[in-house]
Image: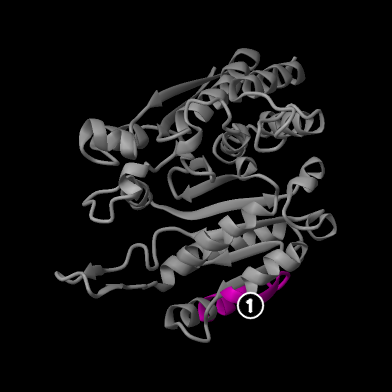
Amino acid sequence: MKVYNIAVLEGDGIGPEVMKEALKLLDVISKKNNVKFDCIKGLVGAAAIDKEGHPFPNSTKNICNNSDAILFGAIGDPKYDNDPKAKIRPEDGLLEMRKFLGLYANVRPVITYDSLLDSSPLKKEIVSGTNFVVYRELTGGIYFGEKSISDDRKSAYDTCSYSVDEIERISHLAFKEARKRKKELTLVDKANVLETSRLWREVVQKISNDYPDIDVSYLFVDNAAMKIITNPKDFDVILTENMFGDIITDEASVITGSLGMLPSASIGDKISLFEPIHGSYPQAVGKGIANPMAMILSLAMMLDLSFNLKKESEIILKSIEDALSENFVTIDIDSKNYHTTSEVGDWLSKRVSEYLS
């Protein structure tokens, strides 16, 4: 029997609630197929600060180092968000985790579902058929550059820097993905203003010579932000740096109709991490209203990309589509006829079990 070791980092807010539902599906797959998932829980974020004094403690690092993949819930807590002078924050743990594990590429698919088109803030004809993926560099840029604030707190700076190596490794991933899709890649930058963006453009132009079958285009980030709203179907693979990627992926997530529907993967050379993009959503904690589908879709990405369990991954995707078409959803999708977090998780577990039988 094949055994996979999974680090389960529930994190903060609704993280534990949506993770519980995802693990139900792992249990179903394990019972139906000749495979075993050893899930070991670790603390991260505010939960880790409260218990161990650090958002990414050594105990969690050890768990991650001894795992084949990482499932991650959410991070963030209002008590830190509302304190601008806090010396340590939950999000610091996520940044340190990316550096420690070498998670250099964030992959976020943006797909619209026919049954959710009415929930999108954009017109149906604009968003229908949208299917693109964003490759965001994760370990460089302004989030990791030198930063400081003056003692009198009247001035501050953040430094954005990139190396050719950092740009090359994610660029190759994005070009290879484009080959599997419509063979179109868009680099999003700000090369008219920023030296780092000019370096990105120079490197990508050079790499494109190795992929002559890929149609490469270039957009300034402000133009890209507008185009994602006005014509999202124009995109296939978007490649961009850390902060730009952070912003445009959150923007893109809204057009699908629900933040609770978007998974992501953070790819490293040795290990990858899979998480929903919806954040900790503290207002929903304990109310049974959190949408577990993005967490479950992240689980499906893990089964596919880390374990090559493509059949099981596809069955989860089909089960999600079934739930949407049959309107077995949480309140964020249907405010009148909705089900609880655990009810949706149970429904999906049953449907996956039926498909595996």
Q: Which residue occupies the extreme bottom position in the image?
A: 192
Is 30 situated left or right of 50 in this image? right
Q: Quadrant of residue 53?
A: top left
Give me the residue at 45% from left, 37% from top: 282
Q: Quadrant of the N terminus?
A: top right
Give me the residue at 43% from left, 78% from top: 196
Q: Quadrant of residue 292?
A: top right
Residue 170: x %, y % from top left: 51, 62
Give me the residue at 46% from left, 33% from top: 15
**Residue 193 visible in rendering:** yes
Q: Is residue 203 magenta?
A: yes
Total marks drawn? 1
Q: Is residue 165 above or below residue 262?
A: below
Q: Give the magenta part as a residue range.
A: 202-222
Residue 90: x %, y % from top left: 33, 45
Q: Amino acid at mark 1?
A: Tyr
Q: Nearer the viewer, residue 11 or 330?
A: 330
Q: Which residue occupies the extreme right position in the image?
A: 125
Give me the residue at 46% from left, 63% from top: 242
Location of mark 1 (residue)? 218
Residue 228: x %, y % from top left: 68, 65
Q: Is residue 9 above or below residue 344?
A: below
Is 345 situated left or right of 20 in this image? right
SS category of the residue bearing label 1: strand
Q: Quadrant of residue 38?
A: top left
Q: Is residue 144 magenta?
A: no
Is 65 situated left or right of 308 in this image? left
Q: Quadrant of the C terminus?
A: top right
